[in-house]
Amino acid sequence: MFENTSIYIHIPFCHVRCSYCAFNIYTNLSHLIEDYIGALCIELKQVAQKQPNVKIGTIYLGGGTPSLLSHTQLERILETIQQCFQVDQQAEMTMECNPEDLQSMQYCMGLYELGINRLSIGAQSSNESELQLFRRSHTAEAVPTAISNCKGSGIQNINLDLIFGVPNSSLNDWQSSVRYALDQNVQHLSLYGLELEPGTAMTKWVETKKLMESDDELMAQMYDWATLELSSNGFEQYEISNWARPSFESKHNLQYWWNAPYLGIGAGAHGYCNGYRYSVVRAPSKYIRQITSANYDELSYPLSTAVDEYYRVTAEDEMSETIMMGLRLVKNGINLQEFERRFNVSLLDILREPIEALSKLDLVEVTSNALRITGKGRFISNRILRDLI
Ligand code: SF4
């Protein structure tokens, strides 16, 4: 049904762990990077050998901090992908970067020459005290330099990430960060409400009352203000946390929200392809050992020997995942005809009662060909999804 598959590559190394971050990343394993790159290439080959001629529409190097890698290391990964798969000539190739790694024009030019055509930069805030609280290793000033280097090198498609709802921060602080992001003249913005993940430094500070958690009302004000501000500056909100200038939506992330296939490569990566959902072992050293030691003859596409857990997705799972992911797309919602073609049932028939109830509260709406969350429902989308599924 979907012509193209996407590839996500996980680079689990960072300079330091940010105070809010619970991702599968490591700050003391840089000595493993070379072996890890070799293991990624083996995993890519294992996956491709089971299924020749897979067409790839998007590639995403995420993490972690992929911008810790040298051009040679990135080249090894990208060349292996080109050798193993049929990569679309127009493929979107995104790399997540920290601003401090983009201070040299030479590094940015090297990325452009490798074919990377989209960068996602973790700016997070314009406020130095928030950046320190986050334990980010860059200042706010590093972002304009990074962007100017990227554009100068030829990479024009740039996303900035920002975080709102930071403990002790005011609406005013948030407004400054959004205006600073708008001043950078980029094509895409991702705005994330701070989540207090178990085990992070930020969560401990809040639990021990060193910091006051932002309340929901303030977070809703921040979100609503940003929504209006971005829309009056030419950005369209197309997903709950994502805004883009026309035709600059992230193609890679759209693949997730359409519940379409993607390969997850690297330690702790998740994938969804050929009817399987799976995750890869999390520890880089175990990943490196496992990818080279086990026998993969018995495994079906797209499972490699480094896969930790996997299961077959039932038709019912696929349907509810398609609804949950599709409703995040606040502009287009879930296309009703495509849903019926995919599952042979009408979405409006199977969810008639909750859709009617949520429509009466003005939280969802049915347009001529789609079901989508309304402006009023965007900030409480989790509750809406729970009521629907
Ligand atoms: S740079 Fe990103 S992945 Fe690394 S610790 Fe910070 S938030 Fe987590």
Image (cartoon, helix red, strand yellow):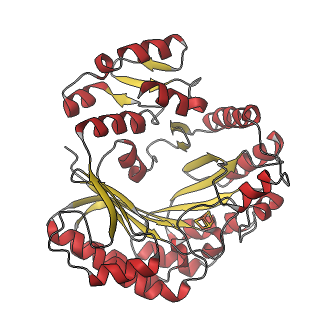
Q: Is residue 325 above or below residue 62?
A: above
Q: Quadrant of residue 150?
A: bottom right
Q: Which image quarter holds the N terminus?
A: top left
Query: x and y percent of residue 248 in the render?
Result: 46, 48
Q: Is residue 19 above or below residue 294?
A: above
- Between 50 and 159, the one nearer to me in the picture: 50
Q: Which image quarter holds the C terminus?
A: top left
**Image-based side of 25 in relation to 140, left or right:** left
**Image-based side of 272 in relation to 138, left or right:** left
Query: x and y percent of residue 129 in the render?
Result: 83, 60
Number of marks in the image?
0
Query: x and y percent of residue 311 in the render?
Result: 28, 53
- Between 183 and 314, the one nearer to me in the picture: 314
Query: x and y percent of residue 199 in the render?
Result: 65, 60
Q: Report if residue 125 is visible in the image.
A: no
Q: Quadrant of residue 304?
A: bottom left
Q: Report if residue 336 is visible in the image.
A: yes
Q: Residue sitting at 41 percent across and 87 percent down?
A: 35
Q: Quadrant of residue 15?
A: bottom right
Q: Residue sitting at 76 percent across and 45 percent down?
A: 174
Report the image quarter containing ligand 1. Answer: bottom right
- Between 327 and 185, the one nearer to me in the picture: 327
Q: Residue sitting at 23 percent across and 27 percent down?
A: 340
Q: Residue sitting at 32 percent across and 18 percent down?
A: 348
